[in-house]
């Protein structure tokens, strides 16, 4: 399935796979898609998530603790693909679990599972030759991060090798919720737009309907991560899918109202 | 490198064979490129070298002596043992070499806020010292477990005006402190220099930190030629991230007859989680910005480590060591906690020199190796730091053993 954003802004929803456990992640993922998520990012838990704030760190720790592995995340992706053929599915990981699994084996398994794209947090374009080669070979979209600190020549390189969408980081910093959306975001999207016609999704600190609506004014999609993961942390296993669905509909609702 | 499963990218920089590179969030790339640029410019600037050399001499106390340990030599009854006395440097360890160098670079880049990670606390103390000297704001991240076992150094850093932030994630040791420092850097990258304390992390750190420590082997090589008229048979150094070891090895690398021996922390057992011997239980992987040997499980999760010495308690090793290991130019062995504690006592009582628990691992290897050699052989131990900081741990551990 090509990654597609049906509404403006589209919604990308991040989940740490295996938090609190894999069956719950599955139920949440299905509920999120049905509530209007265009793309799901399935986060592979890692012991040392150095780009993540405390919320996703804790989620990652819980998932590592209960033994969630990359192979489990790929199996979950295959399951979700069978259940919801039209949802966008992205594997979101630090590089080491993928490297340990084997880059080629990972790409082959991900393709087989019906995954659309891959985002590696600590993969920069200069290190990506073999990575891109394998992703292309298996028709997986490489999604790269663009940062407010990236100069134009880096943005150009990032835009050139990205497929599916480009992930624009809204601010310098780690993942996490925040009150107001950084001004950096709009500026970055403007600079990035010079180099690409791909959809641009804005993430990091996107926590509520107002943020999503604001992003809709200058970008194609919003990525919501920590706010979702935090809600899962506060919910029981049984109520998590419903509360996530309600939250996502709320993000959508105010977008509709704002129009 | 046949053991490395990772493809080297053509545009990658900072490679040591297959190892090294840059695996960082995009947000940090501009800062790494700025640092690389500033370092390249500084290298060709005589004024930079003049200031660095002057501070190393008058402030840090270089050159450090190469001391003939006659009583230890006599006790072991074979090879002549020399100690490269990095422990005599200001702040008590080799770490100051790199801190002065990077502090000067931060000044050139106009960055007034410095962050650092620390394990044993020696790098934190050296960073706090240099920040005091240059009038810079200093924040040091330290695992809570390390704060507990090196509390004297925590106090020293605070006394020097640094803010020490405890890290409670993971094993609450060096690896977790680096994660937290990286998170700070990603957030404050426009104003902050990350003064990384070992030959780890993304390019240019492994190369740059090595260069700031090359002075160790440069001096040692000249000194041994002057004293003995010949090169040593082996140079021995402990290896955590590997900064003192690469500094002690570097100028000897072209001298093919000089064995280079790195000593990792054998901890309290061979099982994963009980030691920090990356070349015994590790495999190639990416941790905290660089591709090197890493202690990890089958799923690629980074393993916990253990060592009696906080400074060696780390799951990965500098990428240049990975290259030297694979090529066979350097050998890597390990000494366990008990051997390091015993070596500490031995050196204290034969020479009146109290080594840091980290450096004691190198002494332990020397104690094992020397008796197998002849009286004509020469060993140099890089005594990377002194043991004052370890009093708490030594009094607990040695009392238990009835010393």
Image: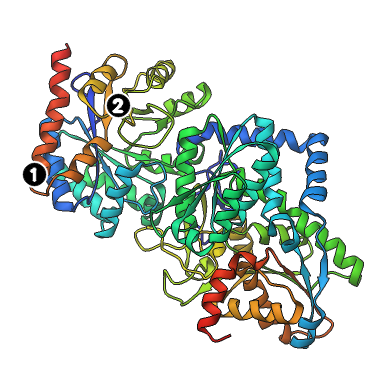
Judge from the rendering whether residue B226 lies leftward or rightward of residue A231; answer left or right: right
- Viewer-side residue, A25 vs B122: B122
First of labels 2, 1 by sequence position: 2
Tell me where residue B269 appears, x and y as whole percent: 46, 77
Judge from the rendering whether residue B155 lies leftward or rightward of residue A210; answer left or right: right
Q: Residue at x 76, y 51 (%)?
A: B60
Q: For marks 2 and 1, give the CA distance.
A: 26 Å
Provide the residue designation for mark 2: A179
Vertical relation: A238 (above or below) B4: above
Judge from the rendering whether residue B243 lies leftward or rightward of residue B231; answer left or right: left
Q: Residue at x 28, y 30 (%)?
A: A223
Looking at the figure, which quarter contains the C terminus of chain B?
Answer: bottom right
Tell me where residue A102 appears, x and y as whole percent: 38, 54
Q: Quadrant of residue A33?
A: top left
Provide the residue designation for mark 1: A239
The answer to whether residue B6 is visible is no
Q: Which mark is residue A150?
A: none
Q: Chain of mark 2?
A: A
């Amino acid at each position: 399935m090509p990654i597609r954003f049906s509404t403006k802004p589209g919604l990308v929803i991040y989940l740490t796979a295996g938090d609190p456990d894999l069956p719950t992640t599955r139920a949440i993922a299905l509920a999120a898609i049905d509530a209007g998520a265009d793309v799901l990012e399935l986060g592979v838990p890692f012991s040392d998530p150095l780009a993540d704030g405390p919320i996703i760190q804790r989620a990652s720790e819980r998932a590592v603790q209960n033994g969630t592995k990359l192979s489990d995340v790929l199996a979950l992706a295959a399951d979700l693909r069978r259940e919801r053929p039209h949802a966008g599915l992205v594997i979101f990981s630090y590089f080491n679990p993928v490297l340990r699994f084997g880059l080629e084996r990972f790409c082959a398994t991900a393709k087989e599972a019906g995954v659309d794209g891959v985002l590696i947090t600590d993969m920069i374009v200069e290190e990506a030759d073999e990575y891109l080669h394998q992703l292309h070979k298996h028709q997986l979209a490489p999604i790269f991060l663009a940062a407010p600190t990236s100069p134009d020549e880096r943005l150009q390189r990032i835009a050139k090798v990205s497929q599916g969408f480009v992930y624009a980081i809204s601010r310098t910093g780690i993942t996490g919720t925040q009150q107001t959306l950084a001004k950096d975001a709009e500026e970055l999207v403007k600079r990035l737009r010079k180099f690409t016609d791909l959809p641009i999704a804005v993430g990091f600190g996107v926590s509520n309907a107002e943020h999503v609506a604001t992003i809709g004014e200058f970008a194609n999609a919003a990525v919501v991560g920590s706010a979702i993961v935090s809600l899962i942390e506060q919910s029981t296993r049984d109520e998590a899918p419903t509360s996530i669905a309600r939250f996502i509909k709320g993000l959508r609702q105010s977008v509709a109202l704002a129009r | 490198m046949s053991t490395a499963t990772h493809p080297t990218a053509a545009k990658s920089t900072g490679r040591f064979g297959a190892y090294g590179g840059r695996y960082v969030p995009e947000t940090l790339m501009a800062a790494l490129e700025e640092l690389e640029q500033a370092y390249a410019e500084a290298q060709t600037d005589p004024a930079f070298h003049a200031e660095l050399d002057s501070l190393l001499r008058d402030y840090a106390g270089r050159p450090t002596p190469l001391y003939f340990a006659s009583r230890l030599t006599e006790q072991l009854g074979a090879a002549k043992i020399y100690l490269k006395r990095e422990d005599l440097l200001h702040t008590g360890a080799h770490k100051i070499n790199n801190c002065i160098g990077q502090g000067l670079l931060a000044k050139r880049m106009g960055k007034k806020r410095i962050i650092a990670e620390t394990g044993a606390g020696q790098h934190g103390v050296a960073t706090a010292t240099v920040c005091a000297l240059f009038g810079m704001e200093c924040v040091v991240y330290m695992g809570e477990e390390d704060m507990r076992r090196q509390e004297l150094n925590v106090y020293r850093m605070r006394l020097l005006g640094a803010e020490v932030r405890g890290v409670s994630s993971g094993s609450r040791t060096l690896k977790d402190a680096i994660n937290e420092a990286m998170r700070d850097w990603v957030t404050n990258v426009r104003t902050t220099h990350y003064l990384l304390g070992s030959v780890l992390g993304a390019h240019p750190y492994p190369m740059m930190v090595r260069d700031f420590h090359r002075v160790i082997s440069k001096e040692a090589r000249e000194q041994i030629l002057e004293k003995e008229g010949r090169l040593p048979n082996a140079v021995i150094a402990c290896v955590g991230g590997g900064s003192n070891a690469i500094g002690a090895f570097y100028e000897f690398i072209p001298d093919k007859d000089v064995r280079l021996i790195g000593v990792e922390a054998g901890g309290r057992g061979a099982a994963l989680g009980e030691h920090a011997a990356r070349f015994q239980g590790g495999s190639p992987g990416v941790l905290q910005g660089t591709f090197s040997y890493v202690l990890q499980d089958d799923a690629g999760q980074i393993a916990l480590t253990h060592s009696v010495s906080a400074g060696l308690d780390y799951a990965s090793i500098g990428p240049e060591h990975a290259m030297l290991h694979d090529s066979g130019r350097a050998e890597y062995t390990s000494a366990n906690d008990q051997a390091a504690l015993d070596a500490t006592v031995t050196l204290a009582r034969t020479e009146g020199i109290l080594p840091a628990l980290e450096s004691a691992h190198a002494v332990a290897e020397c104690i094992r190796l020397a008796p197998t050699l002849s009286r004509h052989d020469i060993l140099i131990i890089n005594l990377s730091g002194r043991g004052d900081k370890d009093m708490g741990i030594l009094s607990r551990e040695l009392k238990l053993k009835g010393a």
